[in-house]
Amino acid sequence: MESLSIAVLGAGNAGTTLANTIAVNGHDVRLWTVEDDVAEDMRSNRENTKYLPGIGLRENVRICGLEESLDGAGFIVLAVPSTVVRAMCGQIKPFLKHYQVLINVAKGIEEDTLMLMSDVIADAVGEDNHIIVISGPMIANELARGIPTAVAIAGTDEKAQNLIQKSFSTDFFKLYKNEDMVGVELGGSLKNIIAIAAGISDGLGYGSNTKSALITRGLAEISHLGAAMGGRPLTFSGLSGLGDLYTTCTSKHSRNRRFGENLGMGMNVEEARKKVEQVVEGIFATKVGYQLGKKHGIDLPITNILYGISHEGRTDVRAEMSDFMQGFNEVHF
Ligand SMILES: NC(=O)c1ccc[n+]([C@@H]2O[C@H](COP(=O)([O-])OP(=O)(O)OC[C@H]3O[C@@H](n4cnc5c(N)ncnc54)[C@H](O)[C@@H]3O)[C@@H](O)[C@H]2O)c1
């Protein structure tokens, strides 16, 4: 296999995992983080004890400065929170060469502009660089341990997609091509809203019936809104749609589900968020999902209830969930 130079920007849970996974195939992987102590820890101990404890870094994962990581890299993986992607692009723009392909794994939609991450990236760096999106049911802590994982890959350049598909795939990591970049991005961004609702259900002590109802009705919301925004309906039943939604709503690792669980157990939004100790992207997603529903005239019952809880100070989550169950009669799929 051709050996590639790949920069991974962001050495959190996802970035560190991806760097180590890509490195299985012997590529020159350069991992960069804004956090000096994390970089030092990885250099000295060959482990990221803050974000991925217990997983040794492969020999060919080099911890680099930003410029050094970008120098000659054919592929640049953006593995920072979606709220940071625009600023990150601004930081790398002065060093970017036209041939470098940007691969985004951040899941989210930009607040205020309501732009998808690929549009944010193109807006921030210009149109010269191809953009690829990798999204799907990828709990980093599982992938990092070699647990079989499959994700969707979509983008603006098929040649680059083919090369990434071949070069990143391992025995336990598979990438499935999808032509629908809008659909792939939307599934990954909107599922976090439903994951919070699924967590609330867990926190309230509800069971599998409720969880299944939330997953299927949540998928209906994502599909209706996604189709109105130009995504292909079938994409939402694929890896980056139902696949990611199922994982996020059921995994003990999902921070959005855990945030919801804390709410269901009686914490307020601030307490629930603090207890998760990491960025809860679903809180932002709920706001943009609510705004997108209004903009496109799509009824989103779960999203609307979550918006009331996380942004309008509604605290009686049991009553809110009960309202949403009543609403089941009014919508069809
Ligand atoms: N964790 C997963 O399982 C997983 C899987 C797939 C995709 N993702 C997506 O990847 C993105 C990152 O998630 P994560 O789980 O790695 O988050 P994380 O909180 O574990 O790590 C975030 C990383 O971003 C960096 N960062 C934060 N603010 C920054 C700034 N201003 N400038 C530069 N770097 C900054 C941090 O230093 C850290 O390296 C998210 O959008 C998430 O949805 C996560």
Image (tube, rainbow, N blue to C red):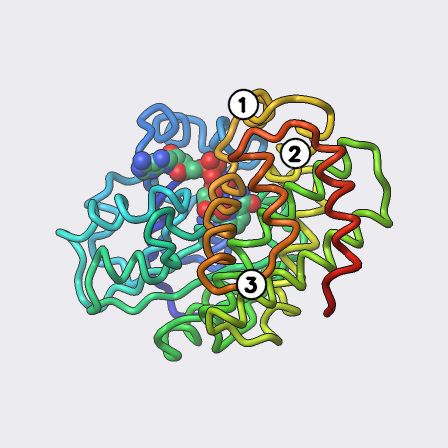
In the rendered structure, which disc, 1 or 3, sits on the residue that comes first in sequence?
Answer: 1
Q: Secondary structure at mark 2?
A: helix
- Front tag of 3 and 2: 3
Q: Secondary structure at mark 1?
A: helix
Say what amino acid the circle numbered 2 marks.
Arg
Q: Could you say which quadrant of the image residue 141 lies in?
A: top right
Q: Is residue 125 left or right of residue 25?
A: left
Q: Could you say which quadrant of the image residue 201 lies in?
A: top right
Q: Secondary structure at mark 3?
A: loop
Q: Between marks 3 and 2, how big is the CA–CA gap?
A: 27 Å
Whether residue 20 is visible here, answered yes or no, is no
Residue at screen point 33% across, 66% down: 131
Q: Quadrant of the N terminus?
A: bottom left
In the picture of the structure, the residue carrying the numbered disc 3 is 298
Q: Quadrant of the C terminus?
A: bottom right
In the picture of the structure, the residue carrying the numbered disc 2 is 258
- Front tag of 2 and 1: 1
- Give the image location of residue 19, x and y in percent: 44, 49
Say what amino acid the circle numbered 1 marks.
Glu
Q: Residues within 10 Å of mark 3 (few under 14, many from 20)?
A: some
Q: In the rendered structure, are the residues bearing label 1 and label 3 in contact, judged by CB atoms less than 8 Å apart?
A: no
Residue at screen point 51% across, 54% down: 189
In the picture of the structure, the residue carrying the numbered disc 1 is 270
Q: Give the camera-side residue of 111 and 62.
A: 111
